[in-house]
Image (cartoon, rainbow, N blue to C red):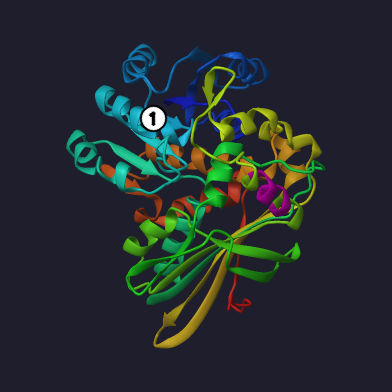
């Protein structure tokens, strides 16, 4: 039925590719495109012959003309962008030039500024509408499933939602003193940026990692979590009617935080170029090169993730709470697709978003955040694609 291009071949892309192959009833042809083809070729060799025809190609995702030429040669029905967030806009430009729907899992970040927000991609809304194309933003887990959870809660459980707390807990243990579960450069830029929360129509900024709470996560136990800025706060504040407060929380162990503070103190997390032996290098990019590759953590990682949303609001003029969450086991994810749970929880929803677009279940031209669509088909797919969700109507609240 559908021809799909996946741009990228890291841990998340590997999961998405595995899931595309598992959904051969929808996807018939897959092209994996990366700057260098080695990882793509290994994925192809591993999965070829399982029902989806797989090819690979080398492409520089910063170069719109290269991307358009690739699209013209392959003829995709959808492009899934699992490259770096710096490359979102060039891939969107190429999708417009060729005329194909677009899916990503993370919003655009300028290479030279530690800042991530939707404004750059939302600026493309009218162009995608006029072209009759859909750009589905944030079809990962957070953002992604968390937005679908919010839309589902709004549709089925609440007349009005007053507060949303998004809780992201990774209780996995990979055995390294310090490593990140996804691209180190993106991860470190995210957690060292100032935190923020939305309340009463405005965003309020706090110093990075300055607000801490403890929470008892189902199937995991009590963990310390910290207030971060995260892009879905921006879109949920617009798309969830009447919401007054939204916060995003992520857990971190003390060892991770100690190492991160040391790296910050010696300048290794800086994005400003420095001169080293006659050439410029960016410290955080050098750090990325010496840290373990997140894709290599799969066989080492034990434990579980728990990611979900606590909603507070009213139904029939009565106060109501609902906690929607998923628990994913690192080792089970690795046995299925060869990746740990952080990649799994992002890569599976990327495939689901693309599946709903190419089958026409979701169709809304323009640049759209995931909570703008009917959540029910996505929620049903989560149950059958490996990310079952749980509802708790009497959860512990975050103070």
Q: Is residue 175 left or right of residue 236?
A: right
How many badges with numbers are in the image?
1
Q: In which quarter of the image is residue 155?
A: bottom left
Q: Where is residue 326 in the image (x, y as percent from the top left)?
A: 62, 57
Which residue appears at 36% of the width and 11% of the height? 73
Q: Where is residue 42 in the image (x, y as percent from the top left)?
A: 65, 17
222 vs 174: above or below: below
Q: Please name whichever residue, 80 or 292, is drawn nearer the observer in this view of the structure.
A: 292
Which residue appears at 39% of the width and 56% of the height? 371
Residue 223 colored in magenta in the image: no
200 vs 141: above or below: below
Q: Where is residue 345 in the image (x, y as percent from the top left)?
A: 60, 46
Q: Quadrant of the C terminus?
A: bottom right
Which residue appears at 39% of the width and 61% of the height? 236
Q: In this view, does 119 lie to the left or right of 139?
A: left
Q: Please name whichever residue, 98 or 270, is drawn nearer the observer in this view of the structure.
A: 270
From which residue to which does the magenta span run?
257-263
Which residue appears at 49% of the width and 23% of the height? 28
Q: Quadrant of residue 297?
A: top right
Q: Is residue 97 visible?
A: yes
Residue extending farthest left:
130
Residue 258 colored in magenta in the image: yes
Residue located beneath label 1 in the image: 78
Mark 1: which secondary structure?
A: strand
Q: Can residue 49 be seen in this view?
A: no
């Amino acid at each position: 039925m559908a021809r799909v291009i996946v741009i990228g071949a890291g841990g998340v892309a590997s999961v998405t590719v595995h899931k595309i192959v598992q959904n051969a009833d929808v996807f018939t042809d897959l092209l994996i495109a990366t700057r260098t083809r080695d990882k793509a070729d290994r994925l192809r060799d591993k999965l070829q012959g399982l029902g989806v025809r797989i090819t690979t190609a080398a492409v520089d995702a910063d170069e719109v003309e290269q991307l358009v030429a690739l699209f013209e040669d392959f003829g995709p029905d959808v492009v899934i962008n699992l490259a770096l967030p710096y490359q979102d806009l060039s891939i969107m430009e190429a999708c417009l030039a060729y005329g194909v729907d677009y899916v990503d899992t993370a919003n655009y970040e300028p290479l030279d500024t530690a800042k991530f927000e939707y404004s750059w991609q939302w600026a493309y809304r009218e162009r995608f509408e006029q072209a009759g194309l859909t750009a589905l933003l944030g079809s990962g887990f957070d953002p992604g499933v968390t937005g679908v959870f919010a839309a589902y809660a709004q549709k089925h459980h609440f007349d009005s939602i007053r507060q949303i707390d998004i809780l992201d807990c990774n209780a996995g243990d990979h055995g390294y003193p310090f490593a990140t579960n996804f691209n180190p450069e993106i991860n470190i830029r995210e957690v060292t940026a100032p935190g923020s929360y939305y309340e009463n129509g405005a965003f309020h900024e706090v110093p990075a990692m300055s607000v801490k709470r403890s929470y008892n996560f189902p199937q995991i136990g009590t963990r310390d979590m910290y207030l971060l800025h995260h892009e879905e706060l921006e879109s949920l504040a617009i798309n969830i009617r009447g919401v007054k407060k939204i916060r995003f929380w992520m857990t971190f162990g003390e060892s991770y935080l100690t190492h991160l503070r040391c790296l910050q103190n010696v300048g290794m997390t800086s994005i400003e170029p420095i001169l080293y032996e006659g050439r410029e290098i960016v410290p955080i990019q050098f750090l990325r090169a010496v840290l373990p590759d997140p894709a290599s953590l799969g066989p080492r990682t034990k434990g579980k993730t728990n990611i979900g949303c606590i909603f507070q609001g009213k139904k029939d003029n009565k106060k109501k709470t609902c906690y929607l969450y998923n628990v994913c086991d690192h080792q089970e994810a690795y046995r299925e697709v060869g990746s740990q749970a952080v990649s799994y929880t992002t890569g599976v929803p990327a495939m689901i978003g693309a599946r709903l677009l190419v089958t026409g279940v979701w169709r809304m031209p323009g640049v759209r955040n995931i909570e703008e669509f009917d959540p029910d088909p996505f929620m049903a797919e989560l149950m059958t694609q490996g990310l079952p969700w749980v509802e708790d109507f009497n959860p512990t609240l975050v103070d």
